[in-house]
Amino acid sequence: MVKELIGTSLVSIMLILSGCGNGEGESALETQLLLDKGNFNAVIKKVEPRATTNSDYLTLASAYMGKAGFSLTSLVGTISSSANSNAEGYSSFVKSVATTSNTSSLEDIGKALVYYKKVVGNKCTDKNSAVPLASVDADICLYIGLADVSQSAVAISYITDNVATFSNNNTVDDKLTASVCAMEYAFNGTKNNKCTIISNSDTTFIKSQKTYKNISVLVNANSYEYLLTSIPNGSSIITKGYCTLDDFTTRVDVKPLNDNYHVCPISETNSSADFTTESVLITAMNSAFDSIGSAVTADMKKDIDSFKTELLKTSGRTNGINTKITTQDIINYLNDKNK
């Protein structure tokens, strides 16, 4: 029943917010038909250039989530089945999400979140507000929570070599080991004994006008390159493929035998915030728990709370449901799942 309600509520909200005029109603229904058919790029092309209303923003959020490989209904089902499958529901969720996500999922979920928040602002995470959320706002807070927790799972798939082995006690993923070493080094300057860290010259991308700390992380016979915001009190950048410093369109999956290529940030402009392990794995996860809690859906809150318990357990904070997840919590969790 919960899945059915969530699967239809976005349509209802869009129609309510779109107005009562026949022309507007027909346009909303036409757009919904495109969404139903999975023609997400057509929806984005149609709506984004003239988006000014809450209905437009919700339409675009839905389209970008679809383009990322997710629907609200499928996410509810995946979270529920993962949470109830075993004691490691979140790691099960990460592996499930990896099977439906794609190379643009992180960016697309980020855009969906922008549009959802154009409608509700900071209502979902505002703990000081004495005004109860309207039912429509509570629904959108649930969507934001689902998007946030999905984005965190997608990010983990980006920082591993093979997410299918995530939490497999018989397999150690060298890239995940290196990624956690990079996170920890950016966070507090610590060099984990599992890795060898080499500091390189700073890397500046001409198009985005951004400069990053650059390190190589060696694990066994493998070397991985990472970009960091700073050391310490910094975060590692989520990257995708390799590109030259002056042209993101050179992005390739495998690094050529060419010193001009570096790991490439997902964000390609100087006006876009970087996707970092801090923003996607910590801030987004805390937002997910707050947003879903604001939606007051008992079943979903129970499932998502089990994820939080799992994440905090490796830090010894088993009773910390109301506690914010920290960078150290995520580092401890990822290390525990990769041994």
Image (cartoon, rainbow, N blue to C red):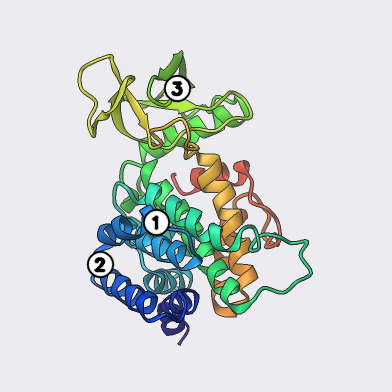
- Residue 287 drawn above or below residue 328: below
The disc, 1 or 3, on the residue closer to the chain's N-terminal end is 1
Q: In terms of depth relative to the viewer, which is nearer, 36 or 30?
A: 30
Q: Which numbered dot is residue 50?
A: 1
Q: Amino acid at mark 1?
A: Arg
Q: Residues within 10 Å of mark 1 (few under 14, many from 20)?
A: few
What kind of element bears circle 3?
loop
Residue to which mark 3 is pinned: 209
| Distance in Å between CA atoms under marks 2 and 1 | 21 Å
Residue marked by disc 2: 38
- Do we see residue 99 in this rendering? no
Percent position of residue 324, x then y: 68, 53
Q: Nearer the viewer, mark 2 or mark 1?
A: 1
Per the image, label 1 sits on a secondary structure element best described as: helix
Ranked by sequence position, the earlier of labels 2 and 1 is 2
In x, y percent, where is residue 282?
57, 47
Q: Is 262 left, or right, of 143 in this rendering?
A: left
Tell me where residue 264 appears, x and y as whole percent. Answer: 35, 30
Name the foreground residue: 135 vs 99: 135
Q: CA distance from mark 3 to mark 2?
A: 36 Å
Mark linked to residue 127: none
Of the residues under marks 3 and 2, which one precedes in the sequence? 2
The outermost residue toward the bottom is 1
